[in-house]
Amino acid sequence: MKIARALPFIGLASSFRILDEKTANELVLESDREQGSWFDKIFSKDKFVTEIDSLYSRVVDKSENIFDNVLTSAGAAFEDAKAQFICMKSMTRFDTRAWLDTAVENDPYDLEGGEDEHHPPHGPHKGHRGHKGHHGHHGHKTNLTIYELISKSNYTKILAKLVNDDEVLVKILNGTKANYTVFAPIDSAFEKLPKNHTEIPKELIRKVILYHVSPEFYPAGRVLVSHTAPSALIEKTLGDEPQRLRFGIGLNGLSVNFFSRIIAINIFAANGVIHGVDSVILPPPPALKILELFPTEFSTLQLGLLKTGLFEAIETSHHIGGTLFAPNNFAFSKLGPKINAFLFSKYGEKYLKALLEYHVVANQTLYSDAFYSPNSATDESIPKGVFHVDLPTLLKDRSLSIDIARWGRFINIKINGFSSVSTQDGIAKDGVIHTVGSVLIPPKQLNGEVIEWTGEELEIEDLKERLGAFIDTTEIEEL
């Protein structure tokens, strides 16, 4: 079973060509021989970053364009590792999401410390001070800026042209006000976009490019231990906070916003770092639109929002950010056929409305590792350890009790002490979506004591008792 638990990290290594086949096999064999944490034997963060540096010290030649050398090496390495990885993948059907949940519960190790002590995270956006750029890092020194590296690369000709056509973008990527991070789409990434025969407005192109830039310094080690990062795209619907990027680890390695795979890492410039990606990262649509795009996951929730009028009320309301705890179709099925039939009946519609209001938080955007709140002058990072916050919902006088336990990259979010978030940080234009595997049920009062729902089987009368107090007075509040 140890090889199964190691698979996501072997996939991660294959995508960067950090470990060759012989080394990977030795690591797995070593974990069978030695006692101790499987993670210590297979995946030490410090060793991981050291391997990255060692690899690129060997394969990057002395030519002027480091970016091209790294991308060429990464492309060849990926093709070389692909056959080996497909063979390994075919031996098991591996549920990455379930594995991550298990890892959070069973392996509370510390993977923090991805931030370089010599170059701490910083940025010029709200709540942070800018910082002058540095010259090179980890031995790959260059006096070229991010803009110059991209302009000289044979792999980013399209990106370079788009940047060159916009003086604002040139100024940012040539500037030294911050140590920037750029997730640079290679030319083939643009070929995946649908063909558009109309001219794309310059303002839209600028927004898309800015969404590939972070005003903070995220070398590979920090990306690895982060769930989200601020981009240079300031989003009005988030209260002029930075729209965020999401990082994930899967069988194909590191990705940004679920679909854009990081294929080259740590190309250091005089004013930051570049990572190459294989897909253009488009700014996300609103949360309700995202639900529409995934009917196999959220068709029941969407039907409920439409049926109760909440969809239109939320869509047309003025709100600054928000958090949606979205029950998937499986979560509704766990309620059983009787309760579902009741909730979606004409008589049960008002109870359904109250129930769904309990899943919506307005004007507060809680990511797994950052918190945008109107009560705070800056965006607040979620600290390592345990973080608690009560989020008021649209259901009058009812809040959700949120506990976030963080061990480095692995983060577990509990709601009301019982329900877990199964998929975190669905980045939306106007907030964030967290998928929950159980419908959230409000507590009830019994002899003056608040009784939370802890997953026991519900009867229709019990559900009506928990929601009855809100039926006559429940009105969707001003968001």
Image: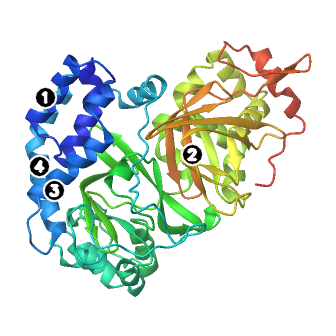
CA distance for labels 1 and 4: 17 Å
Q: Is residue 355 above or below residue 219?
A: above
Give the percent coordinates (x, y) of residue 336.
61, 16
Point out which mark residue 56 bears. Answer: 3
Specify whether residue 256 is in view.
Answer: no
Q: In this view, does 453 lie above or below 197?
A: above
Point out which mark residue 383 bears. Answer: 2
Q: Which of 309 and 202 is in front in this view?
A: 202
Residue pointed to by mark 4: 77
For numbered disc 3, what is the local secondary structure? helix
Give the percent coordinates (x, y) of residue 94.
30, 26
CA distance for labels 2 and 4: 36 Å
Residue pointed to by mark 1: 25
Q: Which of 403 and 177 is in front in this view?
A: 177
Identify which amino acid the numbered label 1 is placed on: Asn
- Tell me which numbered mark, 3 or 2, is placed earlier along the sequence: 3
Identify which amino acid the numbered label 4 is placed on: Ala
Q: How crowded is mark 2: few (under 14 residues within 10 Å), some or many (20 or more)?
A: some
135 left or right, relative to 167: left
